[in-house]
Amino acid sequence: MDKHDDFNNLKIIGKFKNHPIIHNLVDWEILNKILKENNIKLIDFVGKGHRGVVFKGLMDDKLVAVKVPRLGAKNTIHHEGGILKEINKFGVAPIVYNFSEDFLIMEFAEGISLKDYMNQNDIDKKELLWIIEETLRQCLRLDLHKIDHTEIQGGKHIIINKNIKKIYIIDFDKAKKRRAHNFTSAMALFFGKCYIANRVKDVLNISEDEESHIMELVKLYKKIVLK
């Protein structure tokens, strides 16, 4: 990292130290050390969760997400990094570049969340079918490898990048290695009784008979695959 990038990082960190939301959630000295050691130019704050805080950066001309543990919360950073490394092998989640107990550096999942996507007025039917198909395909892979995301239901952990036509499932900090229910959770998300499901059925013009048939297939999946 050159001196200009180092100065840039210190300047942005100085600004974040006074941020009304995250000023007391991050060990700023450790973050600066992580950025230096991994040659990352800090760009912006992305968001915070119950256990981690995420920043956007540039590493070797690649956009990356830098996730660090939230002060005072349970540290699941290394756990999530290990899960991502495993599921990257079968094409799920952002690519992980480096991780430890203190940080997780991964591909930046650029795009719109499924939750926000479904709030749009004009949704293309073919595009929605692709989103559903690809999400279900990734969830099936997770199930077959017995990794349960545990938070598929709300739709905010599914990111759609229409420019490169890619779906990302993110935030595996609470994931568990056990008999998984990702596929059935996604089916309920798309075809159950929630807001997203109602929008899906409206856009795709799914009848009650077709809905019943879909849910019968879910029951069959539970019986055969999740037995």
Image (spheres, helix red, strand yellow):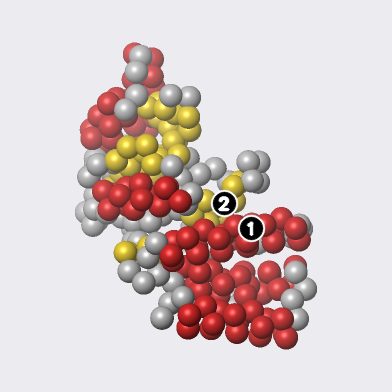
Please name the residue that numbered disc 1 is placed on. 131
Q: Residue 195 lies in what quarter of the image?
A: bottom right
Front residue of 132 and 104? 132
- Mark 1 crowdedness (10 Å alpha carbons): few <14, some 14-19, many ≥20: many
Residue 53 visible in the displayed image: no
Q: Look at label 2 and name its amino acid.
A: Ile
Q: Kindly check if marks 2 and 1 are in contact, taking CB atoms under 8 A apart as contact.
A: yes
What residue is shown at x 50% (from left), y 64% (from top)?
Answer: 140
Q: Residue 103 lies in what quarter of the image?
A: top left
Question: In the rendered view, would you say 213 is above or below 114?
Answer: below
What residue is shown at x 29% (from left), y 40% (from top)?
Answer: 99
- Residue with the most extreme top position: 3
Please name the residue that numbered disc 2 is placed on. 167
- Mark 2 vs mark 1: which is more N-terminal? 1
Question: In the rendered view, would you say 100 is above or below 129?
Answer: above
Q: Position of residue 85 (x, y in %)?
A: 35, 47
Front residue of 2 and 95? 95
Q: Position of residue 81 (x, y in %)?
A: 32, 47
